[in-house]
Image (spheres, coloured by chain):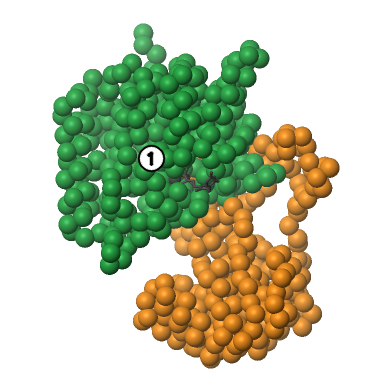
């Protein structure tokens, strides 16, 4: 069985990519399944999707914990997610990046393919929708499906949703990525830190499943425990506060959906970048242009 | 001396819906809920039925609510908050009980339980966070979805072009039951928002707050325009700010002039397909509403305020 784990952000099309690679495998006469990680995360959040391919019927329905291939739809995810966690010996990684494979630090030495899928998508599709380019790179990185089948699956799946022409252009993006892939070996410098979880047995569940704010296992649970999730990692734009211009009206504090703005005693503000998702609402409500949005996850 | 109404400068600052929740960046619903709870304060119990709010704020065992939070089935908001309220009163507690449901959970599936609680005038606060579709399950139409909008169940194609019926007037339905207080709120009018929540908090009996909350995923918009959409909705008549108390309606903000609805539609992917004809149909419907609302029966007792003044507050912003 060949198992694939996709790491993307909500809204990037990782689920569609998983479905398309499964469809390609079916065209090759194989069995395949694809499914998303069912979580609460929304647009912008790091998410996962999975695919399994085999020459016999697949009955395993769990998440993929030990992938043969990990696909990273956006390079910045490597910083915030243990993407290479569980990668099988001999497995490979496909990363959307301008860098060459031997500059990619996955935390393990593994076969690694990089492709600048964003540029390809911008050129071919006029939008940074990278999932089809990534699919082309996958076909090159390992020989579990052919590029021909991948292109057919793209034409069918994307054609069905977006029209024949879109299907054709997306298939071309895959072909271009297939040709432009560079293959090498990744670096093993960063530690792979696994996410901490509390997985109680049913005997350990509190009555009525009610939780107080307390520590269970290695994490805090119950009221107010969400602070452990640093949603600042979702950011692709960053607000910059221009203190001198601020008229201390508190509107940005009111509008921030993530409670990432704090008011100082005199109502100057302080942005908490651990949680700011970079939505830009504070900048749009500010009457004094005292907040400006800058590109990138950091100032 | 009359006590000054609470403003965003004087409202409590302690967050009751903390950071780290999983809502989309630019989610108007999160803004609304956080500010309602800041004002209600720490002695509050929150109920939320199945909805975006439930899913992004409290995925067991993690919760973004700092106050006690409970949930049960989708259709039960009115019934569950009535029950919690009765239980707490029996224990002699004055804890605030608030149910926060989506438009699907209010206009459609929760309507019966809501109507029951309203008719009994149970001592609860019911907040409807209205993003105009069933967003948690990926954008299906609700009774709140506006005319013309694309959803997965009002698709766009050769046979049909988005939703064919108009948005239900939920305030009318609720106010028809002689509730203690009902008001509409917008996150683009912070001081009006704060005043209404504060007012509802001080009252007893059934109180209904209806908040329009733009949704970046379901409306197919840039997260940065969430605020602009909330503002434009009011300026185009897609949303109106008023309150109903003892059967009397008071307009709390009257736009100076009506902006064409196109200004609002063109920022949103869910309306992108709309034909000139459909836009005209929606505009005519809005004009009729506008006249009813601002010129005839809903006569404002308060002086209309300019947008600028309304959103500002405190000496620091004077003269801006
Ligand atoms: C009885 C029942 N039917 C359907 C569902 C599935 N469901 C969960 S949330 C949801 C949509 C909620 O829509 P809305 O109330 O508008 O809240 P939103 O997610 O838009 O904030 C649906 C249909 C359910 N949980 N229970
Ligand atoms: S961009 Fe502004 S409004 Fe959005 S999360 Fe960051 S601080 Fe809050
Ligand atoms: S909205 Fe602008 S002027 Fe007002 S407090 Fe925030 S940064 Fe300062
Ligand atoms: S789908 Fe809409 S309502 Fe739900 S979390 Fe995202 S922006 Fe908020
Ligand atoms: Mg909804």
Image x and y of residue A150, in percent: 54, 85
Q: Residue B267 appears in which quarter of the rendering?
A: bottom left
Residue at image coords 31%, 57%:
B162
Image x and y of residue A65, in percent: 74, 68
Q: Nearer the viewer, residue A192 or A20?
A: A20
Q: Residue A207 appears in which quarter of the rendering?
A: top right
Q: Nearer the viewer, residue B129 or A115?
A: B129
Chain that bears disc 1:
B
Can you see residue A167? yes
Residue at image coords 36%, 43%:
B144
Q: A99 above or below B96?
A: below
Q: Nearer the viewer, residue A193 or A240?
A: A193
Residue at image coords 29%, 35%:
B240
Q: Quadrant of the N terminus of chain A?
A: bottom right
Callout 1: SS:
strand
Number of disc labels: 1
Say left or right for A60 vs A243. Answer: right
Residue lying at the far right of the rendered structure: A203
Residue at image coords 79%, 80%:
A89
Say left or right for A103 vs B206. Answer: right
Can you see residue A267? no
Q: Nearer the viewer, residue B6 or A158?
A: A158
Q: Which chain identifier belongs to the orange chain?
A: A
Q: Which chain identifier belongs to the green chain?
A: B
Say left or right for B199 vs A81. Answer: left
Q: Would you name the residue on which mark 1 appears?
A: B212
Q: A48 above or below B247?
A: below
């Amino acid at each position: 069985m060949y198992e694939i784990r996709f790491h993307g952000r909500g809204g990037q099309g990782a689920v569609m990519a998983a479905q398309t690679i499964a469809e390609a495998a079916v065209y090759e006469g194989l069995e395949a399944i694809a499914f998303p990680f069912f979580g609460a995360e929304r647009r912008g959040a790091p998410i996962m999707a999975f695919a399994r391919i085999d020459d016999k019927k697949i009955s395993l329905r769990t998440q993929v914990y030990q992938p043969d291939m990990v696909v990273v739809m956006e390079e910045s995810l490597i910083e915030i997610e243990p993407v290479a966690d569980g990668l099988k010996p001999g497995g490979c990684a496909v990363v959307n990046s301008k860098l060459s494979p031997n500059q990619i630090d996955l935390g393990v030495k593994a076969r690694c393919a990089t492709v600048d899928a964003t540029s390809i998508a911008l050129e071919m599709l006029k939008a940074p929708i990278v999932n089809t380019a990534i699919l082309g790179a996958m076909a090159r990185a390992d020989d579990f499906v052919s590029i021909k089948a991948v292109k057919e699956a793209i034409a069918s799946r994307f054609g069905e949703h977006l029209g024949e022409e879109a299907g054709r252009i997306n298939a071309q993006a895959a072909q271009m990525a297939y040709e432009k892939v560079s293959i090498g070996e990744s670096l093993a410098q960063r530690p792979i830190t696994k996410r901490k979880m509390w997985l109680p047995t049913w005997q350990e569940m509190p009555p009525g499943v009610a939780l107080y704010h307390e520590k269970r296992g290695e994490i805090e649970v119950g009221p107010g425990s969400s602070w452990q999730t640093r949603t600042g990692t979702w950011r692709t734009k960053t607000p910059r506060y221009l203190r001198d211009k601020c008229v201390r009206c508190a509107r940005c504090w009111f509008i921030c959906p993530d409670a990432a703005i704090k008011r100082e005693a005199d109502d100057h503000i302080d942005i908490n970048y651990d949680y700011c998702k970079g939505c830009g609402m504070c900048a749009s409500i500010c009457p004094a242009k005292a907040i400006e949005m800058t590109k990138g996850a950091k100032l | 001396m009359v006590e000054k109404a609470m403003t965003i400068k004087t409202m409590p600052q302690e967050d009751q819906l903390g950071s780290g929740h999983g809502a989309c960046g630019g989610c108007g619903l999160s803004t609304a809920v956080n500010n309602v709870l800041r004002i209600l304060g720490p002695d509050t119990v929150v109920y939320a039925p199945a909805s975006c709010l439930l899913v992004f704020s409290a995925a067991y065992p993690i919760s973004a609510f700092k106050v006690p939070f409970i949930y049960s089935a989708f259709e039960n908001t009115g019934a569950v908050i009535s029950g919690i309220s009765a239980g707490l009163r029996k224990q002699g507690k004055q804890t605030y009980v608030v149910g926060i449901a989506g438009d699907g959970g209010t206009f459609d599936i929760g309507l019966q339980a809501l109507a029951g609680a309203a008719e009994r005038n149970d001592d609860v606060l019911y907040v409807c966070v209205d993003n105009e579709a069933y967003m948690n399950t990926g954008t299906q139409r609700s009774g709140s979805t506006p005319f013309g909008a694309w959803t997965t169940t009002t698709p766009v194609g050769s046979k049909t072009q988005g939703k064919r019926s108009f948005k239900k007037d939920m305030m009318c339905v609720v106010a028809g039951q002689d509730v203690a207080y009902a008001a509409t709120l917008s996150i683009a009018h912070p001081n009006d928002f704060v005043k209404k929540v504060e007012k509802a908090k001080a009252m007893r009996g059934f109180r209904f707050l209806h908040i329009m909350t733009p949704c970046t995923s379901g409306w197919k918009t840039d997260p940065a325009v969430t605020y602009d959409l909330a503002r434009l909705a009011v300026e185009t008549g897609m949303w109106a700010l008023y309150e109903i108390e003892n059967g009397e309606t008071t307009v709390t903000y009257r736009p100076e002039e009506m902006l064409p609805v196109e200004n609002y539609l063109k920022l949103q992917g869910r309306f992108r397909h709309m034909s000139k004809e459909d836009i005209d149909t929606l505009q005519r419907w809005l004009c009729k509403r506008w006249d009813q609302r601002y010129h005839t029966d809903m006569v404002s007792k308060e002086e209309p305020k300019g947008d600028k003044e309304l959103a500002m507050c405190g000496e620091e912003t004077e003269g801006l």
